[in-house]
Amino acid sequence: MTTAQPGGAADLAALTETCVRNLHERGLSLACAESLTGGLLTAQFVTIPGVSAVLRGGVVSYATDLKASILGVSSERLASHGPVDREVALQMARGVCDVAGADIGMATTGVAGPGPHDGHPAGTVWIAVSTRSGAHMARELHIAGGRSDVRSGAVRGAVELLAALLHDGATDQCAESAVS
């Protein structure tokens, strides 16, 4: 579990640009599945010139049933654990890879607030990144502040998680299959 740290917009823009450059250099594509961020994560990537070479698109699945019908998240998992869950976030990331035909999928799900939802306090967020080759990472965040703070913190956390995945070399197998 991680408590999100505030950071500057310039830092986030630079990190996003670095991720886009790394994806482009490796010949990899990206797609985003978003719930509480409602398109902000995809919009963060769209601010980077040249992103069209890597970004396939984004899916906003704000309603719980859309996570199952569009992204293929297990209905049973959603019924038993709700949408604010590690496995749900991972399934969303995997699902958007399939829907968009991307090498890497990112996902955000959680409670933006102002109050709790399904027993989770506002600011509880799960972010995930998954590759077609099976590598994945997920992280729980607890973000203080109002609704916009939680949503922007989730975007920052997701970009940081993608950067970590790219740095760890977990995408090397993706790059090999993209070239083959």
Image (cartoon, rainbow, N blue to C red):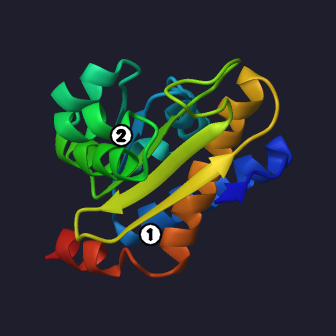
Provide the residue designation for mark 2. 81
Residue 21 coordinates in the image, percent (x, y): 54, 62
Q: Residue placed at 41% from the left, 21% from the top? A: 62
Q: Residues within 10 Å of mark 2 (few under 14, many from 20)?
A: some
Provide the residue designation for mark 1. 25
Residue 168 coordinates in the image, percent (x, y): 51, 81
Q: Residue placed at 28% from the left, 58% from the top? A: 103
Residue 83 coordinates in the image, percent (x, y): 39, 34
CA gap between label 2 and label 1 equals 38 Å
Q: Nearer the viewer, mark 2 or mark 1?
A: 2
Q: Residues within 10 Å of mark 1 (few under 14, many from 20)?
A: few
Label 2, secondary structure: give it.
Answer: helix
**Which label is found at residue 147?**
none
Q: Residue placed at 45% from the left, 81% from the top? A: 169
62 vs 20: above or below = above
Q: Is residue 144 left or right of residue 84?
A: right
Residue 146 coordinates in the image, percent (x, y): 79, 24
Of the residues under marks 2 and 1, which one precedes in the sequence? 1
Residue 125 at least partly seen: yes
Label 1, secondary structure: give it.
Answer: helix
Residue 73 at least partly seen: no
62 vs 102: above or below = above
78 vs 86: above or below = above
Residue type at the position of mark 2: His
Residue type at the position of mark 1: Glu
Quarter location, residue 149: top right
Q: Quadrant of the N terminus?
A: bottom right
Q: Residue placed at 58% from the left, 42% from the top? A: 125
Of all residues, the one furthest to the left in this rendering is: 180
Q: How many marks?
A: 2
Q: Is residue 98 left or right of residue 169?
A: left
Q: Nearer the viewer, residue 80 or 157?
A: 80
